[in-house]
Amino acid sequence: MAKRLIYILIAFLAVSGFAATQGTLIDKRDGKKYKTVKIGDQTWMAENLNYKADSSFCYNNKESNCAKYGRLYTWNAAKKAFPAGWHLPSKVEFEMLINLVGGKSTAGKVLKSKKGWNSGGNGTDDFGFSAPPAGYRDYSGASEGEGDGVNFWSSTDSDSDLAYYMYLNFDCDTTNLDDFFKNFVFSVRCLKGDASEQIAESSSSVVMPMSSSVDVVSPAEVTVGSMTDSRDGQTYKTVKIGMQTWMAKNLNYEMPDSYCYKDSTGFCDKYGRLYRWNAAMKACPAGWYLPSKVEFEMLINLVGGKSTAGKVLKSKKGWDYSDNGTDDFGFSALPAGDRISKGHYFCVGSCTYFWSSTEDFEYAYYMYLDYSLYSILGSDRRTLANSVRCLKDSQ
């Protein structure tokens, strides 16, 4: 009860003493009616957009899901889907919303709907935003995540292939903004008024700054070796890429807050263990450590940059959709997936996350590889469990 009162007090102060104001909107294109809510100076649709446009879809291709959750849109479709007098919000406008309702540490709780979320993850919906757990559709057409989360496209892209979105999850009270591939299919919430003037953002806010000062390494220059973890006797292949010596296999040291995918030891044997961030910070053996975000950036540059690093770092087999890598440098990244919460695992066969030691407030950075050529540096909740690759101490 005390925690909920704090949420309400923060929310009350954040909108300068004014309660959220509800209204309605009728989309003249198809006659659909939407609830709206004014939070501070922003007026939002209080339901997900359900306008049928090219490159928009219903979850699992069922019209009943469109009626329940609204439609899912690729980023390019989302940029054009809004009705007259409304627009797709920018990254900055989502940040304003998050601050208006109390900040990212509590925004997830107060923006989520009061029902429909898995595992006790319902929100309090204090502002009437009523975000439902609509899930998403991936590049292959598969629908994922109903009940677990919702992603809202922003109008702001981070490069030619990636755009920012706001996401909410069932297992936390927080929310955050990240970037992801434009060909994934997410929900849309429209904001009233013409598209706001874009605010120039400093390079320090970009998730994945890539330095051009690091020389690219030839695969022929890579040195292969091995190391034995004295704690449990397991042996790991290693690769030296430039001045960095990496484990070439995911860490599989058992400790508290580490897990096997789907709680099966067979997956640990194949993919290594998945670690919560606090455990990952202590998991590497003596003489090795969890690499920083900057050290992952250096690795990405050493193997040719973010546009091709995913391809050359991935293993030659084991990836779904025939999206295996070339493994030119012997890094042999496997699609180990991750652990979202107890009993909930994600994307084995199609993606992998490697924790870094670099914090981002209550989040931490990771390197992400999936079906594409790209490698991405992003951040997420420390309670998630991801793979670990240890880096050799050069001292």
Image (cartoon, helix red, strand yellow):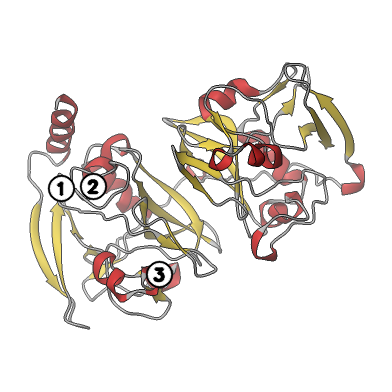
The numbered disc on residue 64 is none
User: Which quadrant of the view contains residue 188?
Assistant: bottom left
Ranked by sequence position, the earlier of labels 3 and 1 is: 3
Tell me the residue at 24%/71% (across/down).
Answer: 67
Which residue sits at x=59%, y=33%? 356
- Asked if the residues shown at circle 3 and circle 1 are in contact, with their CB atoms under 8 angstroms apart, the answer is no
**Is the residue under label 2 in contact with that under label 1 (CB below 8 Å)?**
yes
Residue 307 as seen in the image, left or right of residue 239: left
Secondary structure under tag 1 reads loop
In this view, the mark in front (2 or 3): 3
The span from disc 1 to disc 2 (Cα, nearest Å) is: 7 Å
Q: Where does label 1 land, which residue?
A: 127
User: Which residue is disc 2 drawn over?
Assistant: 111
Q: Is residue 54 above or below residue 347?
A: below
Q: Which mark is residue 60?
A: 3
Crowding at dot 1, Cα within 10 Å, few <14 / some 14-19 / many 20+, comes out as many
